[in-house]
Amino acid sequence: MEFIKRNKVFVILATVLLVSIVFLLIQFLEPNKSTDANVGGNDNEQAANISNFSLKLTSANDLTFHWGVNQGNESISKVEIFHDITLLKDVTNQAVFSTPLFQSGIKTGNNEFTLKVTLGNGRVLEKRLYRYIDEVLNFQVNQRLEGNILYMETMYFVQKEQKPRTPMVSYTLNQKGVIPLSFVKSETVKDDGDYQQIKDYYTFDLSQVTSGNYIFSLSFNFNDYNLVFKRTVSIDI
């Protein structure tokens, strides 16, 4: 008793440790119990799900959707693609869907698309994807040399209600010197659905340069949209 009185804290700690050891031994020796009611995972394996949903904007300005649905033991009654909350297409009997961007009603900027799969029991599966469509599309540069003038034309598509200001053009040369660049005009050359094609005209005055190969490294900066297109033009004089 005298030992216990003098070592009260030690005795308490030893008692707590002993009780803990006994408790752990009981837990270890007790048969394991599982709360998983799906033996073998068969129910999960057979449940329908959307395996993938993707979108590509092609060089021809088509939006092409691909998707996959693991049907499991369920029947599928309907498959639909939505743009925001608007039905874009019932694609129940398809695995790929393409639509022209310019005639689709889809705008540039942020867009949300949803694949909805309605099962035979009424349950609905959904998978979303988000796509930013640039405000300037299919940017092209063409040029021709006539005498001492290099004529350059740029073409691109924009939304009709969002026509940007003519881009700022800058360039560097592979040779010393500066060649004067002049903006001539801008015009709309084609309407296509909600979009229009713009053509801008420029000229370079080559009258003061010597013979040789000139490589123009050009930057077209659409400040309205923080978009920059870089192109290279090479000519022999």
Image: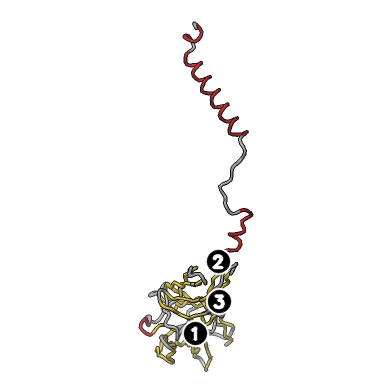
The spot of residue 203 in percent (x, y) is 46, 88
Depth check, front residue: 155 or 121: 121
Amino acid at pointer 2 = Asn
| In the image, residue 125 above or below residue 21 | below
Amino acid at pointer 1 = Pro
What residue appears at the point 38 percent right and 75 percent down from the top-left corner?
A: 224
Sooner in the amino-acid sequence: mark 2 or mark 1: 2
Q: Secondary structure at mark 1?
A: strand
Q: Residues within 10 Å of mark 1 (few under 14, many from 20)?
A: some
The spot of residue 197 in percent (x, y) is 44, 88
The spot of residue 29 in percent (x, y) is 63, 33
| In the image, residue 1 above or below residue 163 | above
The spot of residue 213 in percent (x, y) is 59, 83
Amino acid at pointer 3 = Asn
Is residue 192 at least partly visible in the picture? Answer: yes
Q: Residues within 10 Å of mark 3 (few under 14, many from 20)?
A: few
**Residue pointed to by mark 3:** 174
What residue appears at the point 62 percent right and 53 percent down from the top-left corner?
A: 39
Residues at marks 2 and 3, CA–CA distance in whole angstroms: 57 Å
| In the image, residue 143 above or below residue 128 | below
Residues at marks 1 and 3, CA–CA distance in whole angstroms: 40 Å
**Residue pointed to by mark 1:** 100
